[in-house]
Amino acid sequence: MPKNNDVKFEVLHLPPMNTNSLLVSVGRDAVIFDAWGKAADWEKVLLGRGLKLQAIYSTHGHPDHISAAPALACAFNIDWFLSDKDNYLIGWGNELLDMFGIPHIHDDYKKPINLLPGTVEVLPGIKMEIMASPGHTPGGLMFYFPDYKILLTGDTLFAESFGRYDFPGGSAEQLQKSIRNLYNKNLSDETYVVHGHGMDTTIGWLKQHNQFFIA
Ligand SMILES: [Zn+2]
C-alpha cells in the first residue's frame, strides 16, 4: 500500500471483523469503500485520524458492504455511490446484520447515487476506474486505481475462490464473464488486490493460486 505524506490507502476491518473496507485519504479528505460495520465506529476512526469524510462508494448492495453507508452519508451530508442495479438489495439480508449485531438500515435511509462504469476522480489526484462486474449481484462494480496499482474486487473474486451467485439476482454465467474480463484487462502482476473478504493478494499471486482467475 502506498503511503506518502499526502496519499494513504488503508484496508480496515471494522468490528465485528468480516468485510474488507478501504479508507483512502489525501491530506485530511477521505473516502470510504464498502463501509461495513456501524456508522459510530467509522466516526471514531475518522475522528482519530483527523479526517473529513467526502464520499462513500460501494462495490455492491449486500448488507455487509453498505451497512454504515446511509447513516454516514447522512451524518456527514455527503454522497453515497452504488450501482442502481443493486438498489433492490438495500434493506435485504437483515438476518446477516442481526448475526453481527449491526443495526438495520433505516427505512428512510439516504438514497445512493447511481454509479456507472467509467473514470472518476474520487479525491484530488486520485483517479479511479469503475468496472461493471455483475454476477455476484447485478450491479456489482470493481474499482481500480491506475496510478497506485490497487484493485478492489468486491465479492466477485476472492484469494482462492469466487463470490456466490445463488443470492437474488446472481448469475454464474455473468460472474464467470466478469472474472474473465478482469483477467483480460491484463493488469500488471504487482497490482495490489483487496477482495471483499479474506486476505489481500496481487494479480500475479491470483494467476498462480486462483484456478478460477483465467481468460
Ligand atoms: Zn456480497
Image (spheres, helix red, strand yellow):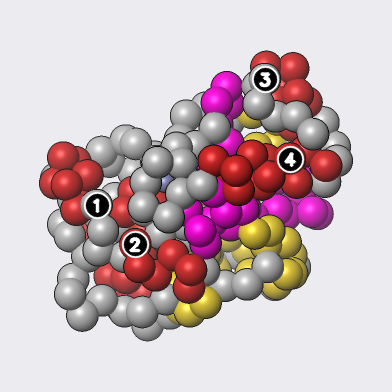
Circle 3 residues within 10 Å: few <14, some 14–19, many ≥20: few
Q: Which residue is mark 1?
A: 93
Circles 1 and 4 in contact, beta carbons < 8 Å: no
- Coordinates of residue 118 in the picture (x, y in percent): 73, 69
User: What is the spatial separation of the Cα atoms under label 4 and label 3, in whole angstroms?
Assistant: 12 Å
Q: Residue 156: within the magenta?
A: yes
Q: Is mark 2 within 8 Å of ligand 1?
A: no
Q: Which residue is mark 3?
A: 211
Q: Is mark 4 within 8 Å of ligand 1?
A: no
Q: What is the span of residues highlighted in magenta in the rendered image?
A: 133-161
Amino acid type, label 1: Gly
Q: Which residue is mark 2?
A: 89
User: What is the spatial separation of the Cα atoms under label 2 and label 4, in whole angstroms?
Assistant: 25 Å
Amino acid type, label 3: Gln
Amino acid type, label 4: Arg
Q: Determine the residue positioned at 45% across, 37% down.
A: 164
Rendered image: mark on residue 180: 4
